[in-house]
Image (tube, rainbow, N blue to C red):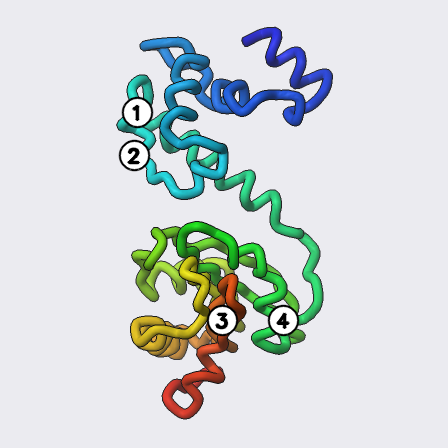
């Protein structure tokens, strides 16, 4: 591990293999060396992108892993995901098309993700969070999870976006029902929800526009 660390210090993490990176995150395992655990983990998930669809319990079940090590690995992956998101405010999110363009990366994600976006009075992004990741056909999420986060961050204006891995951005009946629950919770907290946009490989859809007259957005 020392030679790996020296190479990282000299040439940066890009010089390390997938196995070496995982081993570094897991350094300190006792039952077997971190390299052995890393090999077993990568055999289970395949390419590094596989970590995005694995839950803590699944990783913890791999021989040599524990819940603590799994949490450490998931946290490292999440930090990497967050670091890849542009820190600049970007252009204002004035339309559903603006939201879809900013979050176009979600269109090719293999599992459903729900993102909460906080914007200022000029509709510029001041914060964005992946509140939940699910599976190919859905995600477990409650309005409480969304607005506990937004309230903690002091958001007064927000937008929501999630993806449809199926490729069809058409809002489902459940999408519309959940959006209604979000709007009800937002009113209680005096948070204005501008839109809930769905992105997919086949395009995007605005629930504000498709459910016009049925839902009352801010």
Give the structural element (helix, strand or loop) at label 1: loop
Instruction: Locate the N terminus by quadrant.
Output: top right
Task: Quote the CA–CA distance across marks 3 and 4.
Answer: 10 Å
Please say if the residues under marks 2 and 1 sit with CB atoms less than 8 Å apart: yes
> Circle 2 is placed at which residue position?
58
**Does any portion of residue 106 appear in the rendered image?**
yes
Query: Farthest bottom residue?
Result: 213
The quarter of the displayed image where residue 210 is located = bottom left
Task: Quote the CA–CA distance across marks 2 and 1.
Answer: 7 Å
> Circle 4 is placed at which residue position?
98
Q: Earlier in the sequence, mark 4 or mark 1?
A: 1
**Does any portion of residue 188 appear in the rendered image?**
no
Task: Quote the CA–CA distance across marks 2 and 4.
Answer: 36 Å
Q: Earlier in the sequence, mark 2 or mark 3?
A: 2
Q: Earlier in the sequence, mark 3 or mark 4?
A: 4
Q: Is residue 164 left or right of residue 144?
A: right
Task: Quote the CA–CA distance across marks 2 and 3.
Answer: 30 Å
In this view, the residue in front, 182 or 155, is: 182
Instruction: Estimate how packed mark 3 is, as few (under 14), some (14 to 19) or many (20 or more) residues with alpha carbons within 10 Å.
Output: many
> Circle 3 is placed at which residue position?
197
């Amino acid at each position: 591990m020392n030679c790996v660390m020296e190479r990282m210090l000299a040439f940066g993490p890009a010089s390390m293999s997938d196995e070496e990176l995982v081993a570094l995150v897991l350094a300190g395992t006792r039952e077997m060396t971190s390299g052995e655990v890393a090999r077993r983990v990568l055999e289970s998930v395949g390419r590094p992108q596989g970590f995005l669809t694995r839950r803590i319990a699944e990783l913890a079940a791999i021989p040599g892993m524990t819940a603590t090590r799994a949490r450490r690995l998931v946290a490292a992956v999440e930090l990497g995901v967050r670091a890849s998101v542009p820190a600049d405010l970007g252009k204002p999110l004035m339309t559903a098309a603006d939201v879809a363009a900013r979050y176009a990366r979600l269109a090719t994600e293999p599992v459903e993700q729900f993102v909460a976006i906080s914007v200022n009075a000029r509709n510029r992004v001041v914060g964005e969070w992946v509140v939940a990741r699910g599976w190919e056909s859905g995600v477990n999420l409650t309005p409480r999870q969304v607005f506990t986060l937004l309230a903690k961050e002091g958001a007064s204006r927000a937008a929501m976006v999630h993806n449809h891995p199926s490729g069809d951005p058409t809002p489902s009946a459940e999408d519309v029902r959940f959006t209604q629950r979000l709007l009800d919770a937002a009113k209680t907290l005096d948070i204005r929800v501008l839109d809930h946009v769905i992105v997919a490989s086949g395009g995007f859809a605005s629930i504000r526009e498709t459910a016009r007259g049925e839902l009352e957005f801010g």
